[in-house]
Each structure stands twice: as C-alpha cells, then as structure tokens.
Image: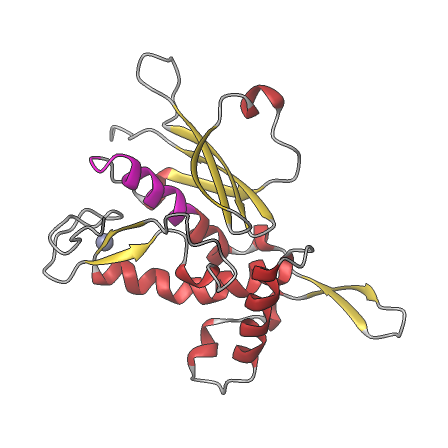
C-alpha cells in the first residue's frame, strides 16, 4: 500500500517539512521496462534538500555502474542506451550531472587499435555516496525510528569475495533480480560489537561492502 510520506520525517536527516516526498531508496533510474515488477520499489520520505542532493548524483551513479558491469542483461542494455543519449546533450543540460570523461582510464588497446577504457566505481566519491544513501534508506525503511547520518556510513567496492563466516550471517534486506541485492547483518546491543551493521550490496553487476558505525558520544 502506498504510504503518505508528506508528514513523515525525512528518512535521511529527520526533518519534517511540508514538502517531504517519497524517494526511491534504490535510484528509480536503475529500474527499467525489463525489471520484474512483482518486487517492491522501496521508497522512504525525503525532504526537498536531501532529494535534490541525491538527484544530482544518481544520474552519474547510473552511468558509471552501467559502464562498469560486464554481463549484458536486458536491464543493462536498456540503461546503457539511455546513458549514451545523455553524452549527446549539450553542456549546461541535464547530462552535465555526468562527468563521465573524467572517470575513464585508458588501460590498453582493442585489437583494432582503438583505446580500451575502464571505469572504477570504487574510486568515485559520488558513486559511493549513493551506495551509502541506499544503506541509510534501507535501514530507515526497515525500522523507521532509525535515521542514519551519512557520516556514520562507510562504503567501498568489494575486491575479495565476502568471507564465508560473514556470508552466513547476512540477511536479505532488499532484492530485485538483475538490479539490486542488498544484504546486511544488524547487530544488537546484546551482541558485543561496536558496529550497527555490515553490508554486502550488489547493484547491477557491481559489488560493494559497507559498515554503519555506532552513534558516537561526543567527547
Ligand atoms: Zn532530509
């Protein structure tokens, strides 16, 4: 059932404004016409400031993630066609959100001699910011009493497989086939740890890991 988000606190900063809107936790632009619609597209309430802030980075996020993956699922083909359209837009237009050229690194040559490029989502601050936002939004969606500040979240690309002992404690938080697979382990106060949660997140084909730190008591 659709929720009235307007009078709920922003899931990211806690503010109640009279203009809070529902915001897609996994960016709406990652869902395509090929995406299975039987899976929920999770939204939380977000204030206009947070909404605007995320919107700028999400177009960039989509471009980098779509370029980074290797497996051509129907979703990826559709997203890539969409991303390349934005390259043609003039400066000052919507495509300006995507500083794509700066992200390409030449790594060799194709057999025909043209340069081969690679993108590195894990080195990209704007990409990691969206990953952190997804962790924050999913935490709030799971428990609306929790509002996680960006400073409490660490996200990185996964360079090694998740260790098997961590793998066994991860629970599914959110999954849409070919789009997102977000798993986490939430620690409770009884379990002696300093962490709020640990995460393994796959978006399109790109895998990230993350940690939410406890609330620090200021010195
Ligand atoms: Zn906010």
Above or below — where is 127 with respect to 104? above
Q: Pick the residue in front: 158 or 72.
A: 72
Q: Position of residue 178 (x, y in %)?
A: 55, 50
Q: Which residue is at the far front?
A: 38
In-image side of 148 versus 58 (left or right): left
Please give the name of the residue rendered at 36% of the width and 27% of the height, measured from the top-left corner: 196
Q: Quadrant of ligand 1?
A: bottom left
Q: Residue 148, can we see it?
A: no
Q: Position of residue 144 (x, y in %)?
A: 22, 38
Please give the name of the residue rendered at 85% of the width and 68% of the height, measured from the top-left corner: 110
Asked which colour scheme the image uses, the reply is secondary structure
Please give the name of the residue rendered at 35% of the width and 38% of the height, measured from the top-left corner: 152
Locate residue 171: give its quadrant: top left
Q: Pick the residue in front: 135 or 183.
A: 183
Q: Position of residue 71 (x, y in %)?
A: 68, 55
Q: What secondary structure is the magenta-colored segment mainly?
A: helix
Above or below — where is 125 with respect to 52? above
Q: Position of residue 142 (x, y in %)?
A: 30, 36
Q: Which residue is at the far bottom?
A: 90
Where, quadrant-wise, is the C terminus in this rendering?
A: top left
In-image side of 38 versus 117 (left or right): left
Locate residue 153: give its quadrant: top left
Q: How many marks?
A: 0
Magenta range is 132-145
Q: Pick the residue in front: 125 or 209.
A: 209
Q: Residue 119, can we see it?
A: yes
Please give the name of the residue rendered at 43% of the width and 84% of the height, measured from the top-left corner: 92
Is 169 magenta? The answer is no
Is 139 magenta? The answer is yes
């Amino acid at each position: 059932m659709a929720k009235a988000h307007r009078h709920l606190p922003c899931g990211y900063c806690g503010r109640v404004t009279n203009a809070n809107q529902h915001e897609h936790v996994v960016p709406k632009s990652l869902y395509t016409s090929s995406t299975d619609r039987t899976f929920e597209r999770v939204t939380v309430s977000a204030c206009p400031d947070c909404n605007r802030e995320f919107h700028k980075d999400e177009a960039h996020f989509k471009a980098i993630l779509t370029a980074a993956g290797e497996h051509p699922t129907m979703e990826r083909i559709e997203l890539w066609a969409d991303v390349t359209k934005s390259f043609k837009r003039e400066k000052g237009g919507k495509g300006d959100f995507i500083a794509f050229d700066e992200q390409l690194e030449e790594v060799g040559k194709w057999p025909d001699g043209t340069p081969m490029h690679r993108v590195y989502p894990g080195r990209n601050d704007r990409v990691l910011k969206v990953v952190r936002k997804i962790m924050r939004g999913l935490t709030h969606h799971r428990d609306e009493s929790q509002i996680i500040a960006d400073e409490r979240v660490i996200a990185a690309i996964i360079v090694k497989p998740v260790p098997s002992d961590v793998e066994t404690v991860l629970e599914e938080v959110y999954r849409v086939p070919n789009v997102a697979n977000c798993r986490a382990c939430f620690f409770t106060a009884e379990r002696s740890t300093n962490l709020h949660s640990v995460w393994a997140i796959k978006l399109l084909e790109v895998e990230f890991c993350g940690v939410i730190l406890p609330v620090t008591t200021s010195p």
